Amino acid sequence: MLFLAKAALGFGAILALSGAYVFHEGVIRVDVDETRGDCHHVHVWVPATVVPIALQVVPRVKLQQAAEQVRPYLPLLREIAKELQKYPNAELVDVQQPGQHVHVSVHDSRIFVDAVSDEDNIHVRVPVQIISDVADRLESVAPGV
């Protein structure tokens, strides 16, 4: 019985540490609510740790093609990531028109993109660190940038 208790404690500790590692970079959250037609709702929450792991399993040829296409923008992407980390709370864009509103901001080192219209509501939350991770991976397969 004591062995089972120790095994359960060990398993619980491993599970807690694994969860802490997976969520240490935050969560990517995408919420899309469509009010026209059949009123579709899509809500996706993914640990941000998945992005660097997913970039490791993408076929190298496909990643090189993507890196070649974004090569001119990689220095800009790197600078944006570096500057956004300096401003953990900032309002970047706020555009309002009749029936539409787009708001882009950074809060607690996460990029918030909210696009609201009469027909659709789109909300995206992405940790700023993910931009650096993606830039690092693309630069590693497209040297010379």
Image (cartoon, grey):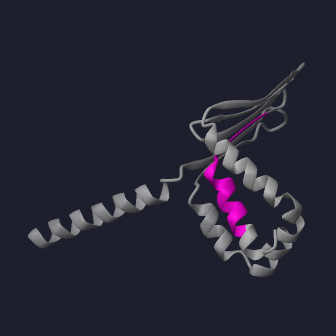
Occupied quadrant, residue 42: top right
Q: Residue at x 66, y 76 (%)?
A: 57
Q: How many marks?
A: 0
In the visual, does 34 lie left or right of 48? right
Position of residue 126 relative to residue 98, above or below, is: below
Q: Residue at x 77, y 36 (%)?
A: 39
Residue 127 magenta-drawn? yes
In the visual, does 111 lie left or right of 74? left
Taking the view exactly as shown, the residue that stands out farthest to the front is 144
Position of residue 97 relative to residue 50, above or below, is: above
Task: Name the spot of residue 35 as percent of width and height, x first.
Answer: 79, 32
Q: Residue at x 81, y 75 (%)?
A: 64
Write down the region rendered in magenta: 121-137
Q: In which quarter of the image is the C terminus?
A: bottom right
Q: In which quarter of the image is the N terminus?
A: bottom left
Task: Name the spot of residue 47 as percent of width and height, x first.
Answer: 56, 55
Task: Name the spot of residue 81 as percent of width and height, x first.
Answer: 69, 50
Occupied quadrant, residue 114: top right
In the visual, does 135 lie left or right of 46? right
Judge by depth and name the residue closer to the eye, 56 or 82: 82
Judge by depth and name the residue closer to the eye, 1 or 25: 25
Q: Which residue is drawn at 60% across and 68% down?
A: 53
Task: Name the spot of residue 76 as percent of width and height, x first.
Answer: 81, 53
Residue 12 magenta-drawn? no
Residue 60 visible to an observer of this rendering: yes
Residue 1 visible to an observer of this rendering: no
Taking the view exactly as shown, the residue that stands out farthest to the left is 2
